[in-house]
Amino acid sequence: MRVLGISGSLRRDSHNTRLLRVAAELMPPPAELVLFEGLKDVPPYDEDDDGDLVPEAVRRLRNAIAAADGVLIATPEYNSSIPGQLKNALDWVSRPPAGNVLRNKPVAVVGASTGSFGAVWAQAETRKVLGSTGARVLDLELPVAGADRAFRPNRLADEELQARLAAILAELVEAVAERHLVAA
Amino acid sequence: MTTVQAETTRAQEAAKTAIPTGTWKSDPVHSHVGFAVKHMVVATFRGTFTDFDVTLANQGDEPGLYGVIGTDSVQVRDENLKGHLLSPDFFDAERFPEITFTSTQIRAQGDELVVDGDLTIKGTTKRVEARGRINGPAAHPAGGERIGIDLETQVDRTEFGLNWNAPVPSGGVAVADEVTLTVHLELAKED
């Protein structure tokens, strides 16, 4: 079982990418979490470029999601909302509407910010957008506040947050397993 | 004193609500299964299902009305909206490919047909009461007999887990919770 991790932050030392690395350590075997590396290459959505042939970076993103059993998004919060590049990527992935690669795909959203709210609004809006794409969105959140102080090597400093992240991953894996049962 | 006219009226009333014996199957071309819900606070939005199979079975004892709808046959005039309706936000058609109805009691009240039954949407079953009429039988020119059944009921979609909504900037929400379900069925008698 493979879960694709997408960080909504492009920064090299991103807290949200670090959160996904912690999640990768916590994934219950044999499930594994693989990080998507190409978000920065996704161009602005333009319907003129969206047809049988799409930009290579978009093709890679769509293929990576299609090949994954589930998706875990870690988002920062820009001006109380979703970072533009993440929203733009989801807009690309949401096409074509009737058969996009997110449709029915189990997806969980977590988030980290240096502020005191832990990207809670960005997570809520990301869940809303994902719901609109037809994804199977887990109604869960993980607000990691004070992100510049929230991490220890390979884990979250706060025991409760660490446990909540593990619980979210367990629910994501369970949603994937349920979906496989339906398909069987 | 009972007049001829009154007796005729009573006979007509009885004909409207009598449940004919036999097994009757829905004609998909001449039947309609749909829903209506308040949209943007002020308007009424309608949709239909095109894949359904309804049976009225009456062997002279307790008649039963059974229906199954293919969830992914929902028809609206926008593929984005159809995709959203089939997604987990609404019907979750992948996990719940069918909507079903099984009557628990069918009775006449005046000239009205009243059908109680268990309606299952998105894996949740609720008891509903549908009201309407039954007409016929009528002879079909090509042979056989037909009856017509019209029924309507109201449900709260959130009780079935269809919870999606969005606030409207001017007030209220995009989609009301109460949904009217309507069927207009033409059923053919099986040999």
Image (spheres, grey):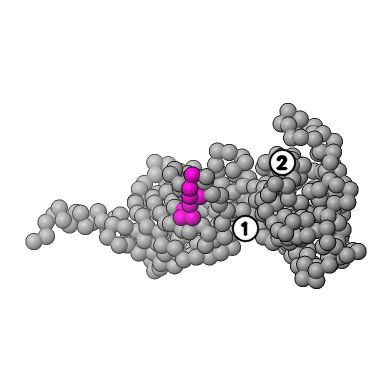
Magenta span has A159?
Answer: no
Name the disc covering residue B61, or none. Answer: none
- Furthest residue to the left? B1
Q: Nearer the viewer, residue A4 or A74?
A: A74
What SS does tag 1 mark? loop
Going by the image, does B91 lie left or right of B43? Answer: right
| Rendering coords of residue B78 (x, y %) | 58, 38
Magenta residues?
Answer: B170-179
Q: Which residue is tagged 1?
A: B96
Q: Which residue is mark 2?
A: A91
Give percent across and percent down for residue A58.
81, 39
**Label 2: chain letter:** A
What residue type is disc 1 on?
Answer: Phe
Three-letter amino acid code at disc 2?
Asp
Given the image, what chain letter belongs to the residue carrying mark 1? B
Quarter of the image that includes the N terminus of chain B: bottom left
Residue depicted at x 88% and y 51%: A13
Left or right of B77 on screen, residue A129: right
